[in-house]
Image: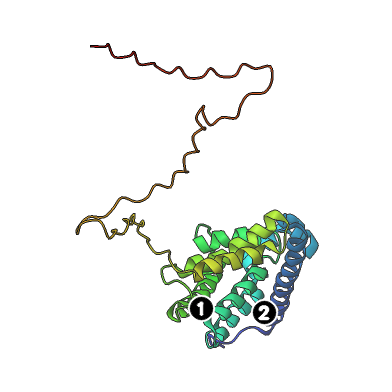
Amino acid sequence: MKTSPNSQDPDALASDRPQRADARRNRDALLAAAEGVFNEQGASASLEAIARRAGVGIGTLYRHFPTRDDLIAQVICTGNEAIIARARDLLTADAPLAALTSWLEALIRQSATFRGLSEALTTGYAGNNGSQQLCMACDVIMSAGGALVVRAQEAGEIRADVPPADVVLSANAAAWLAEQTGDAEAALRHLHLVLAGLRAPAPAMISPALPRSAPATPDAPAGRRSAPRSSAPARPARAPSRAARPPRGPGRRSPRPAKTRRRSPAPRR
């Protein structure tokens, strides 16, 4: 008796169900262990330590997650989905810049979930790693955030000459800065500093002021202007002459009187 292509042996079905259930349990156990180890040791934690905590072999880990970035992408998948959904909700907010600021702050918190995540995400945003899953998550986040940036630009609240991708990357850079400095508040300070620069208009070119000529005096002829008065300090008064000087004290020789010239008498005739 021939069986239809869609029919299967009941014994085979019974043996397949436990295998699929075991695979699902192993995957869930690996994700839970990875989240705990990453939170404790950072994104560069040992994959062998994750497999041991999950109670499976390292081969089982690689069958489910061929690369480290594949594992990271699945660990942060829930947070990424929340970030993307929030960006879409904020597209209808009344204040585009306030909506963008709120979303970037949430992205900073997501990028700082555990140590080393911001660096891994930066690689994903740049597209320089081999993890297709992590790159896909970064691409979707970049697209969702870029729509908020464009909306704020169209509203005239931020400069239009800034690429949206640079604004989204600034949140990830802020998270990396806080991680490297150990200052949790540094991320928000850096973000608001960037946003303040985006709001500032481009500086206008100011020509140097030309020197102003002095106004013409009434005595000056038409078409000519008198020279400006000098701002030099006035010259000190001259010392009094010798005749006006006070007499000298006792013991000093008095000045000699001036000699008078006598006229000789005219001869008699």
Q: Is the residue marked by circle 1 packed among few (<14), some (14-19), or many (20+) residues within 10 Å?
A: many
Query: Is 31 in front, or is 124?
Result: 124
Q: Taking the image as drawn, is residue 30 in sight?
A: yes
- Amino acid identity at mark 1: Leu
- Amino acid identity at mark 2: Ala
Among numbered discs 2 and 1, the one appearing first in the sequence: 2
Secondary structure under tag 2 reads helix
Q: Which residue is mark 2?
A: 12
Distance between mark 2 and mark 1 Cα atoms = 52 Å
Q: Residue at 47% across / 70% down in the picture?
A: 164
Q: Is the residue marked by circle 2 packed among few (<14), some (14-19), or many (20+) residues within 10 Å?
A: few
Front of the two marks 2 and 1: 1
Mark sitting on residue 204: none
* Above or below, 29 relative to 7: above
Quarter holding the N terminus is bottom right
Q: Which residue is mark 1?
A: 148
In percent of width and height, residue 86 lies at 60, 82
Q: Taking the image as drawn, is residue 55 in sight?
A: no
Q: Quadrant of residue 83?
A: bottom right
